[in-house]
Each structure stands twice: as C-alpha cells, then as structure tokens.
Amino acid sequence: MPEVLKAPLTLEFPFTRSLGPVQSAFLTGLRERVVLGVRTGDGRTLVPPVEYDPVTAEEIRDLVEVAPTGTVTTWAWNHRPRRGQPLDTPFAWVLVRLDGADTALLHALDAPGPEAVRTGMRVRVRWAGERSGAITDIACFEPYDGAAAPPGGHTGEFADPVTGIVAPARLDYTYSPGRAQTAYITALAGRRTVGERCPSCRKVYVPPRGACPTCGVATAEQVEVGPRGTVTTFCIVNIKAKNLDIEVPYVYGHIALDGADLALHGRIGGIPYDQVRMGLRVEPVWTDGARYPDHYRPTGEPDADYETYKELL
C-alpha cells in the first residue's frame, strides 16, 4: 500500500462586483475618512450599512454619519496572522460598536497582547495612509482613552463615488486524495491508468473515489484501463487562461478510456480544433518526467459507434 499523498494547494481569483447606492456611499466615505451607517424605519443605525432592513426586509437608504470611536463588544486573539490580513503581527479580531451605531463592525485591533484587550474597552479608527474606497481604508482599530468623538453630519453625497470594487478571493488548504486516488496518481507516474470496480454493479470508475457513486458501496478491486479511449463530448476554449502556456483555441473533452465506465477530463491535441468530434478515438501523449498525460491525440482508428459510449455522456 503506497503512502497516502498530500500537497498544499491554493485557489485564488479576483471577484469583481458593482456597488449599490448604500455600499457605494459607505466605501467612498471610508476613502474620505468618514464612517457612514444607514438608519432603519424604527430608528436603529446599522454599521456597516445594508440595503434592506434585516428585520422587516424594508429597503433603507437613509445614510447617517457615525463617530470613528467606539466600544469593543467581543474579541478573539489572532496569534498567527495570515497572508492578506490587516496586520502582520499578532492582533485581536474585534467587534466594535461605533458611537452612534446600534450594530458592531468587525475589524482588527492593534494591541501588544491579549492581556491588553477586554470587552468594553474604548477604541478608535486608525486610517490607512493611502485610501481607495475599501474596507482596508480602515487600517485597524487602536486603544483610545479620550472622549467620544461626536458623530458628524455627512449625508453620504460625494462628488466622485466608488461604483465598483475588485476583491481578491484566496483559499489556502492542504489536499489529500485519499487511498483510492493516491493509487491512481501513483499508477500515472508509471504511465498506467488504474480505476476501481464496484463489487455490486461491476462498473469501473476512473479516477476512483473509493466508493461507487451509484451503489454507495466501497470499492477496492483495481482495474487497469486504457490507454486508448473515446471522446464522448468536448468544448472549444477561446479564452487564454492565466499562467497556462497553451495557445487558444484548444479543445478540452471528456474521454472514456477503454474498460472504464466513467469519462475523465483531458486536453485534445494533434488535430485541428474544428475537426474534433464525438466518438473520436484518442491515446495519451506523455512528456518526460510528467506525472500525467500532457494531452490526448487521435489514434487513426475509425470513430467509435455512438451506442458504445452514449451512456458515458
């Protein structure tokens, strides 16, 4: 039994969104060192503001300025900051109810240690040196012993409002493929493709998942499949992916390897993109040192009959 594999993986992409009038005013206000909330029909002031009352679902647009000072309502110490967090030294995550607000805002508190943080402590906003209209315009909160700053009277009207933002989304995690896929990946290193057969329905699944998705029973019997297969369906890619050295257009398809009852994904090359078709017979192309096929190319065999792969679409 080979050692189960694991590897660090990162999923990252930019998330672009437009802003409605309330969020636009809130973020533009931060750029101008103004904190805005929104007043509900029953007189509550919500910070950060929302476009609809969470209690009544009524649309709310009445913007009101609150103070940059406030009170910590609860907190948790972050002893090991991660990439992209507000501070690169240990800090406290805090919920702060700003003076003039009825709800709390989540942000970071710059404090020397957890012993310096307590519920009920007074804090104020520390503004970022450069501001662009984002929550990061508040660099963090800091302890504050002075008097409460009076809320201003800003109406939320700005000459140059922020209308959209780009927020980077990133997830760092450690992935382990488990027993079945570890065996599959290990076999690929030897240029073999191995699936597992269900003991009940006798279908062979590639890549194996350790259990039959139809019957729900564990699978353990290994079956070598391929290396040739049949294109069951495909798409033509016309948008070049970042950091992928493949010229567009190219074809990405589902390929049912001979002996398998589940089609896997693969790039199809060695043929003009507009000549790829369902039923095309293909084989893997390996590059030196690779752990998986670089792409699949036509074998020159006659196309497979539709009846032989229609259940694998």
Image: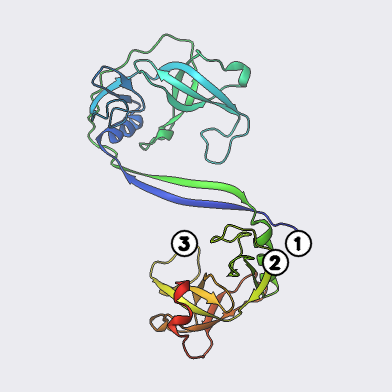
Asked if the residues shown at circle 1 and circle 2 are in contact, with their CB atoms under 8 angstroms apart, the answer is yes
Q: Nearer the viewer, residue 11 or 240?
A: 11
Callout 3, which amino acid?
Answer: Lys
Q: Residue 98 location in percent, x, y?
A: 39, 18
Residue 176 percent coordinates (x, y)? 65, 53
- As displayed, is residue 175 above or below residue 242? above
Q: CA gap, disc 3 to disc 1? A: 34 Å
Residue under label 2: 186
Residue 217 is left or right of residue 86, and the answer is right
First-in-chain label (2 vs 3): 2
Q: Quadrant of the N terminus?
A: bottom right
Label 3 with label 1: CB-CB less than 8 Å: no
Residue 67 appears at what percent x and percent y? 36, 18
Question: In front: 253, or 204?
Answer: 204
The secondary structure type at the circle numbered 3 is loop
Q: How is the image coloured?
A: rainbow
Is 112 above or below relative to 299? Answer: above
Distance CA(mark 2)–CA(mark 3): 28 Å
Q: Secondary structure at mark 1?
A: loop
Q: Which residue is mark 3?
A: 242
Look at the image and tell me whether residue 282 can be seen: yes
Left or right of 287? Residue 37 is left
Q: Viewer-nearest of labels 2 and 3?
A: 2
Q: Amino acid at mark 2?
A: Thr
Q: Which residue is mark 1?
A: 2
